Image: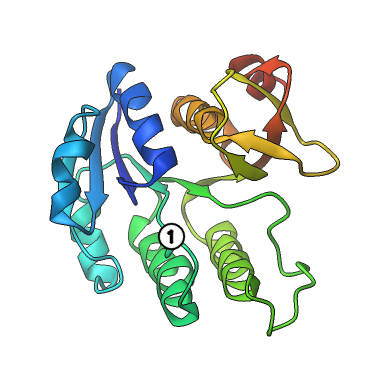
Amino acid sequence: MSNVIILGGHGKVALLASPKITEEGHVLTSVVRNPDHVSEVEATGAQAVVEDMQELDVDGFRRLFDGQDIVIWAAGAGGGDKERTYAIDRDAAIRAIDAAGERRFIMISYFGAGQDHGLSEDDDFYPYAQSKADADDHLKKSAAQWTILGPSRLTNDEETGAIDVNPEEGDSVSRGNVAAVLAEVVNRQELTGKTVEFNSGSTPVSEALDNL
């Protein structure tokens, strides 16, 4: 079993994935910014650590990752302020990647992320799209053993445990299904170097990942 650290541990997907990860026997550390979220995070079986990732430099992330085998980036500014989006989704993510070294690094991105997103700079979604494109590119060029998850539009529908991988177009996927994919990928070192784009579908998660 592995020591796993998840950044953005109070996010909806992270909260759903955390008990799945700990039930597999992994030791999970969950990083949150707000100390008021510690009890909710620790109820998932994780150990909470309070840190503001916007303030951490590369050495700070290195200390945070000491003893960890797998880093999961589930953090995000959540839209709104574009400067905070760049600061978290791009700059902090890049510092975390640099600090991770040769560890496994699982990045939660989004379906269709890339430099060819086609958005103009005055589009409200541009800061997020560009930040994710830059962070994903940096991860691919890094020393990390990376896997990028590209779920399509997130919903609060019930988890079905079934997905459609590498579809031609994005549709939607429940946060529960994203959590199921994330927890499964923790156990799948063979997915290193792969980008997994997916919608909800009819193929069980484990079987869908077997076919990549």
Q: Is residue 59 left or right of residue 107?
A: left
Secondary structure type for disc 1: loop
> Where residue 118 appears, x then y in whole percent?
80, 72
> Where residue 45 appears, x then y in whole percent?
21, 27
**Label 1, on which residue?**
76
Relative to 159, residue 127 above or below: below
Relative to 197, residue 176 above or below: above
Q: Is residue 22 left or right of residue 175?
A: left
Q: Amino acid at mark 1?
A: Gly
- Residue 37 or residue 18, whichever sits in front: 37
**Mark 1 neighbour density, 10 Å: few (under 14) some (14–19) many (20 or more):** many
Q: Is residue 143 left or right of residue 49?
A: right
Relative to 171, residue 135 above or below: below
Give the position of the C terminus as an image quadrant: top right
Confirm whether residue 66 shows in the render: yes
- Residue 179 or residue 195, whichever sits in front: 179
Confirm whether residue 151 shows in the render: no
Tell me which corner region of the image, top left, top right, bottom left or bottom right, holds residue 171.
top right
> Where residue 129 appears, x then y in whole percent?
63, 67
Give the position of the N terminus as an image quadrant: top left
Q: What residue is at 40 percent from the left and 51 percent from the top?
A: 102
Tell me which corner region of the image, top left, top right, bottom left or bottom right, holds residue 125.
bottom right
